[in-house]
Image (cartoon, rainbow, N blue to C red):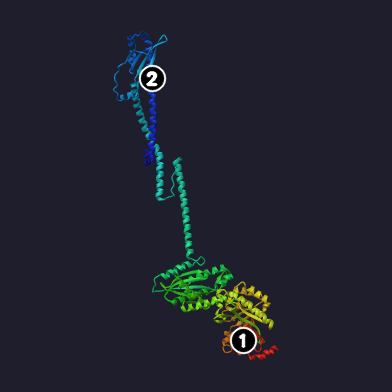
Amino acid sequence: MFKLLPHLKIAHKLLLTELVMTLSMFLVFIVFAFGSHYHNLRTHMIRDILVQTQVVATSIGPAVMFGEVNSLTKTLEPLTENQNIRSITIFNQHHQAIQQLNPQHPQSTAVWQWLYPFFRDMEVSTPIVVNEKTVGTLQATIKQAQIVDVLIGFAWSNALAVLAAALVGCLIIWRLNRNIVNPIHALQSFVSNITRNHHYDQRITIRSQDEIGMLGHDINNMLESIRQRDAQLQTELEHRKIIEEKLQFLAHYDKNTQLLNRHAFEEAITRKITAPPTSQSNVYLLLLDLDRFKIVNDTFGHNTGDKLLLQVAHRLRGNLSQKDAIFRLGGDEFAILLDAPGRQTIEQVCKRIIQTISAQFIVDDHEIHIGVSIGIAQLRAGFDSKTEVMKNADVALYQAKDAGRNTYRFYSEMDEANTSELRNLREALHFALQNQELELYYQPIIHTQLLKTIGFEALLRWRHPTKGLLSPDQFIHLAEGSGLIVSIGAWVIHQSLKQLAMWQEMFDQDLFMNVNISSRQIDDDSLSDTIRHALDFYHISPRTLNLEITESMVMRNIDAAKQILYSLKQLGIGIAIDDFGIGHSSMNYLKQLPVDILKIDKQFTAGIPHDKVDIAIVDALVALAVSLNLKVVAEGVESAIQFEYLQYKLCHHVQGYLFSAALSASQTTTFMADFPESIPAVFRKIASADNQ
């Protein structure tokens, strides 16, 4: 039975348990009742027989004493009639049986007579006393058949009572079990429904405060915890999804510009290379590098630089279709992958990009002008590797920068050879300064009225071990691109002022020196300290030093240039605008800047006296300088008639091959020592007279 219990339902288990308990109670009750009833019947029977035997014993005392057996038998007859007495025996005082009677009674026909042997006979003894002297004993053997008959009747009546009680009990138990099992069944159905449908918003109705009610309450709490956990998990999943989307975005997009990043670029270019070639279009890689972006970062800070990059990204996107992929590779470097039928389409795109990027940017109330150089390489699907395509585009980009920046170049093998040579030259430039390969040449500046040397322009030369003497236009852009221009520029300032100190001591304390400054130098914070240190070290008066800057350097960012030039002017030095007139300067800007000298470019003086346009330009520039109280220097003077015209127009300072080319330091010293013999003969008499 116990093995079957695990397979029964709770209702059946409860019913079985309650029935077993009820039957057990009834069994105990019946056993107790039967035992009690049997004891009572037996006790009453023995008492009744004892009473009879005592009466008889009193009557038979003399007969026993005198041995009168016949009288004994007659006296014992009332006892023999008792249905419960099996035998009667009289014992004398020596305990010898003197008389024994075995009454014969009708045999019982009851079906339960087989039970009689289980109830053994009982014996009761009564002393026979005469004159307070025991003369014998009356012993009666009692059978319990009548007791069994009574007990059987008692059993039937109790069985009917038990059956009726059991039926009533089962009904009561069934009703009670419904109150217990139904809530459990409802609980089980509810939990099954929750498990099957996962509707954790449902709740159990609590109808009792017992264990089942407490269990329902706990299940409700558990469901609430599950609901809260699910809500939290859902929130976490949504948060994780957002994070994954952000990570996916960060993995493929640049945070600042929102353009695709280098990782996405490498994946895209790999797909393009491995894709089967098509005849409809060709794939081109455009590698873009912003010109003068480092100056923006150094001048206005990286925050402004980041905002500028964002505007650049917007302009690039505005010039391309949505299907064209634009990437920010890092810093100020961008890349574009375009499908185009041919070079003409790419050229049109590049021109639009250059025009767009060259337009003025307004960032944090600053007017910023930058450019963009573009290198272009065509992808040959199935043939080129990613590294090779990048190298080709980089070579083309280098050529674009070498061509003056803010332009574009397509890759060619010839350009690659030239680029390789330039890179070798740039690498050699790193060691030029420490190997003492750099030299300064000096071109005299002549006063047109006094006809004397009043100053010099310091010009840098590189004496290359294999290529010979190189002019600045052959390597200065390499120095600017690599950042070497700052250290080279500092060396030029110290070397030129050192030489000026020697010539001032030898010839004239008023001699001055013009030193060219690059855009990278003027943006360097250490320029002022370098100049101040050199002036103090060589004991040079600041008024005898002029810094030459180009017109394009000033106009690229007038606000920054104005601030920097005024800080340099505080040192007491002069500022000269070189190549004035060939750019797109604004007269209003020129009025705002602390300029002392204008240098007229040689392309205008070359037309004197035949080109009316050049003459008009020179006249206007000289008049402008005079009206602004500026000194003016004409470059490229190579003939006497040019000199005489400029002298007539009150252009006080000139320099050019008419008087001297750029000379080494020793040649310049000789030129000064031999004056006026060192100048053309036509001017010697005038120079000698002026010196007298």
Quadrant of the rendered structure where residue 577 is?
A: bottom right
**Residue 621 point in image, percent of width and height:** 61, 83
Answer with mark 1 or mark 2, whichever residue precedes in sequence.
Answer: 2
Q: Residue at 41% of width from left, 42% of height from top?
A: 184
Residues under numbered marks 1 and 2 in contact, where contact means CB atoms less than 8 Å apart: no
The picture places residue 665, in percent across and down from the top left corner, at 63, 82
**Element on which disc 1 rests:** loop
Mark 1 neighbour class, 10 Å CA radius: few under 14, some 14 to 19, many 20 or more: many
What is the three-letter code of the residue carrying label 1? Answer: Ser
Amino acid type at image mark 2? His
533 shown above or below 31: below
Dividing the picture into quadrants, the one containing residue 388 is bottom left
**Label 2 environment density (alpha carbons within 10 Å; few <14, some 14–19, many ≥20):** few
Up the image or down, 337 lies above or below 614; here it is: above
Q: Is residue 595 visible?
A: no
Residue furthest right as drawn? 692
Quadrant containing the C terminus is: bottom right
Write down the residue under mark 1.
Answer: 660
Marks 1 and 2 sit apart, C-alpha to C-alpha, by 168 Å
Q: Residue 44 carries which label?
A: 2
Q: Residue 455's spot in the image, x, y percent? A: 65, 83
Q: Which residue is drawn at 47% across and 58% down?
A: 240
Question: Which disc is residue 272 wearing?
Answer: none
